[in-house]
Image (cartoon, rainbow, N blue to C red):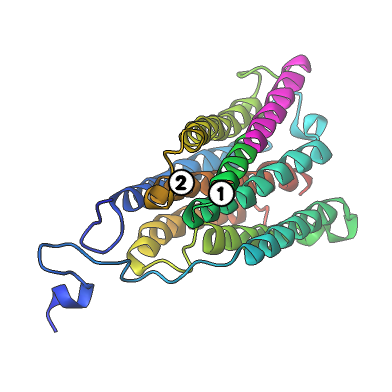
Amino acid sequence: MERTNTGVPNEKMLMWAFIGSECMLFASLIATYLTYRGRSLVGPYPEDLLNIPFITVTTFVLLMSSLTMVLALSAVQRGDARGSRVFLLLTAVLGIIFVGGQAIEFSHFAGEGLGLSRNLFSSTFFLTTGFHGAHVTVGVIWLLSLWVLTMRGRLGPESSVKVEVAGLYWHFVDVVWIVLFTVIYLMSGS
Amino acid sequence: MTSEKALGIESGGVVAAHAHEEPHASNRTYVVIALVLGVLTALEVMVFYVEALAPVLVPILILLSGTKFALVVAFYMHLKFDGNVLRGLFLGPLFIAVAIIVALIALYGYLL
């Protein structure tokens, strides 16, 4: 593991720089959503479609995946192979459940006539949440690849930075959803 | 003290250990944080459904979601225990992002 001259591993420094740039990406998407909010000329409108109880469940699933992720890192750092395997797989499964929930929501919206370019709400909603869903999907693939490494016994405490960096990405995806859940779903009542 | 020594850099530019990192939190702390995140999420949804709180819905939601955000970043992402370099890398862009979002919320009259 190579470190930068600040004492921080290169991979970790790179991931934090990437996360910084991702803050700006999602800020621009959220800014676009807020700018066009309430300006759709034709329906369906958010208040007709957004299912708060359903999204609350998937939000809770993603939040709990952050717990299993940090427990996976802790297990890898301790050299607990079984814990590493279980928690990495559990995190990936929770991520898959979240993405599955998003797919159900998208198909329901499409069934109600909300296509990608139906109105300003649909365009900004699908763009913002779709980008987030793509990030979760990348994270799931990343976690599953780490899980394969643990199954082959190639992920021990000496290479825990690999899990730490993946964890940083995963937690960032989680905090972005904390903001999206508030701005898109809960603020629809304001 | 030279600047290299101040940074904890050994000869050859290699640092022996995480110069600015502290030990991370315990698994017990992580579980407690998860419980707090769950409770805060439940509070957010409860506030959404209470009509009497509608006039102050957005400020309350910003406070609750901001707390959740900070807990995840500080404990799960270990930023509380990491050095100032990583904090700067994240908090700089985050400040701009939050400023843009909060400014737009206020500009379009959603705040109150």
The residue closer to the viewer here, A157 or A130, is: A157
Query: Which chain is indicated by disc 1?
Result: A
Query: Residue A145 at x, y = what percent?
Result: 47, 31
Relative image position of residue B21 (x, y in whole percent): 39, 69
Residue at the disc numbered 1: A72
Above or below residue A174? Residue B43 is below
The quarter of the displayed image where residue B16 is located: bottom left
**Which quarter of the picture shows residue A173?**
top right
- Number of numbered tags placed on the structure image: 2
| Residue B59 visible in rendering | no
Q: Is residue A33 left or right of residue B45?
A: left
Is A101 a magenta residue?
Answer: yes
Q: Amino acid at mark 1?
A: Ala
- Residue sitting at 30 percent across and 59 percent down? A8
| Residue A142 in the image, given as x and y percentages of width and height | 48, 34
Residue B11 located left or right of residue B73: left
Q: Nearer the viewer, residue A22 or A85?
A: A85
Question: What number is the disc on residue A99?
Answer: none
Tell me the SS state at disc 1: helix
Check disc 2 and report its element: helix, strand or loop.
helix
Q: Position of residue A166 (x, y in %)?
A: 46, 43
The secondary structure that most of the magenta stretch takes on is helix
Quick check: A166 left or right of B109?
left
Can you tell which quarter of the image residue B18 is in?
bottom left
Q: Nearer the viewer, residue A148 or A13?
A: A148
Q: Residues within 10 Å of mark 1 (few under 14, many from 20)?
A: many
Question: Contact (CB < 8 A) between labels 2 and 1?
Answer: yes
Decide whether residue B50 is among the magenta residues: no
Which range of residues does the magenta coloring cover? A93-113
Q: Residue at x 51, y 38 (%)?
A: A29
Q: Which residue is mark 2?
A: A163
In-image side of A79 versus B56 (left or right): left
